Amino acid sequence: AFLEAVHSAHWGPRDLATFGLCTGEEQAALAPLQQLGTWLRDPRGQRLVILHLEEVMWEPTPSLRFQEPLPGGASYLELALLVLYPGAGPMATVTGAGLPGAQGLCPSQNTRYLVLVVDHPESAWRRPGLTLTLKPRG
């Protein structure tokens, strides 16, 4: 369903809401999502690697660690997105190790996915994994 939503997106306000992207500000995840949509239409020999969540730690800081991909499966990842399936929650700014900078999440009643860009994807399966800090936006 996520890949279908990316494939059919035209990146207007409705699509931004689908992916939990904030309108009216620069979004780190927008260009990578558009790049993924282009890849879905024409992969040109590139592969898509999906990482599976292995461990979640909530204390002292939320931390996610993923299963290591098969050998050669993720030797060099040019684009990495973390896709979360949201519940109800406030708008937030997310920072942390493994992210290229602060990223906004703006869930709404139309949000089906929350998307973050991952800076160095190999850190997602090595300890300590991706460490996230969520700060509610006011």
Image (cartoon, grey):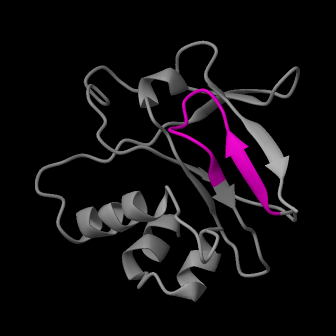
Magenta range is 91-103
Q: What secondary structure prevails in the magenta region? A: loop
Judged from this view, the residue extending furthest toward the top is 127
**Residue drawn at (87%, 20%), measured in percent from left and top?**
60
Q: Nearer the viewer, residue 101 or 51?
A: 101
Q: Nearer the viewer, residue 138 or 15?
A: 138
In this view, 99 is above or below 138: above
Residue 103, x across and y down, in percent: 62, 51
| Residue 70 on image: x %, y % | 36, 24
Residue at image point 64% right, 70% down: 22
Q: Quadrant of the C terminus?
A: bottom right
* Residue 90 horizontal/vertical position (percent): 86, 63
Tell me which residue sits at (61%, 68%) in the image: 21
- Residue at x 73% of width, y 51% of height: 93
| Residue 84 seen in the current view | no
Q: Is residue 20 left or right of residue 126?
A: right
Q: Is residue 96 magenta?
A: yes
